[in-house]
Amino acid sequence: MPPLPLARLRARGQLLEIDADVLRFAPAEAQQFLHDTMGLSLAPELVVALTQRTEGWAAGLQLAALSLRGRPDKGAAIAAFRGSNRMVLDYLLDEVLAQLAADTHRFLLTTSILTRLCGPLCDELLASEANSSALLYALERSNLFVVRLDEEGQWFRYHQLFAEALQQRLQQTQPELLLTLHQRAARWWLQHEAWAEAFHHALASGDTAIQTDVLDAASGPLLMSGQSALLRHWFEQLRLTFAQRSPALNLFYAWSVLLTGELALIEPSLQLVEQRIASDNDGESVSWRGQVAAIRSYRQVVLGDIAGALEAAEPAITALPQYEPLMRAVIAMNLGAVVALAGQLAQAIQLLTEAENVANALGNPWVALAAQEFLGQLWLEKAELERAAASFKRILQTEASAFNQRVSATLGLATISVERNDLAAASAYAQQAQALAGQCGLPEWQALSKLQLARLALAQADNASGYALRAEAIAHEQRCLPSARAIVAAVRVQLDVALAELPLHADAPALALGPRWFPPPGTKGQLSSGGAFFAGERA
């Protein structure tokens, strides 16, 4: 048969292509097949689960149906159905792998540990320049259980049952190779800053040195992007003792537990860092001491001990010039929050401005945005309305801003409009903040936006709406975490104080607009939505 001009026919719309996606069974088709052909009646949700496990592969559905016969708990059997199932494994070995060339067979087994594949990564695992990109493309074109993940054809994955069968075969035939392959994969992903994949393979490799290297490289970026809970989980999975960790890793661990609220776990790490560097005065050791002080300082903020936080912050402020730039920006912003809570607004603005400038120079929008959020609130506290408005507007104009930062900025602009006696603009901003708070999902922001709307309604003698909004705010307040609840309660109390002389009837006088929506310096808890930056978990 002469070769066909497939590309030309495809461009003209004259080619009907039937590939794996077309042949894949949808849940309704799978249910009909299982019932009519295999004589198996399953609840719709079990059919969906089985279709997902087999990815609609007809032979996989047939093998799964055979394995389900006589099984009383079919839901558990479907959940446990894997490529290592004897019938699946036998089928793939006899019908697929046995038909392949030795090099292709070796390629599939070696790369089966990967959740996604590209040519250079496969070459790394094979320890050779095997032109893996071309082989992956050929396997995908042959519909050999290889799924393309992008339009460019650079990334692929194996069908999940096929991958599990290959992994089982690799474990049976070359168990000694597994750890080496995971080590190679971890190193490759680490070089490409794909932290999750690097950690997955480092953990599977059992190599403590590689695991430590991954944590060393990934901890900073994870904290900067608000993934402190994930980082803490990684530390706990590795089960490294405090003594096995470097001072840097102990500090990263302390940050992760601080930001996830486990304050009792902080001190052992900090004490070990101090012991390790007790007699050292090089720049790195000075930086580490500063971080110890910064962590302790913010811990005291969380505990409501502002005086203790300010005292603990002094060594961290002294050490600021010794930090590498991004850490300097982060620590400066945390310390700015501490001194702001202590009422030292001028020093807070100086520290936060430094944090913003350094972050902008480094091209790090997350730290810069968090500093902007703090600064906007402080300028508002100082009645510098133009500067406050500029800070809040920059947040709203920055694509990288998180929902909680956008809510904070919009509420700030509402407050500025109140100060300018533009209640229409204030109401519009407060309505926007309420909508953003709903998208954000955090109850503290929903409560604060409701309180702002309640204040505006009461100021315009709309008492029914004002009291209804206040009641809604209280409902959200009750869902807040303790530290956030304290802030919302402080704002609500400001409103309640202003309401004390307001009669409860329809023609009551309008409420004079009182204190701003955000907690004043000295309020227990954090000043900003994000808490300590590295920001906890970003909304």
Image: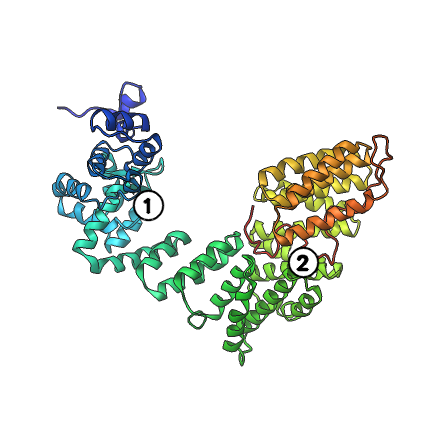
x then y, percent, for residue 270? 54, 70
Label 1 and label 2: CA atoms lie apart by 42 Å
Q: Which mark is residue 337?
A: 2
x then y, percent, for residue 346? 75, 59
Quick one: SS at disc 1? loop
Quadrant for the C terminus in the image: top right
Instruction: Name the residue located 31 percent from the left edge and 39 percent from the top edge.
Output: 75
x then y, percent, for residue 488? 69, 48
Q: Which mark is residue 116?
A: 1
The outermost residue toward the front is 72
Left or right side of 170 for 390: right
Identify the amino acid type marked 2.
Answer: Ala
Classify 306 as above or below 82.
below
x then y, percent, for residue 118? 31, 45
Left or right side of 402 for 41: left
Q: Which mark is residue 231?
A: none
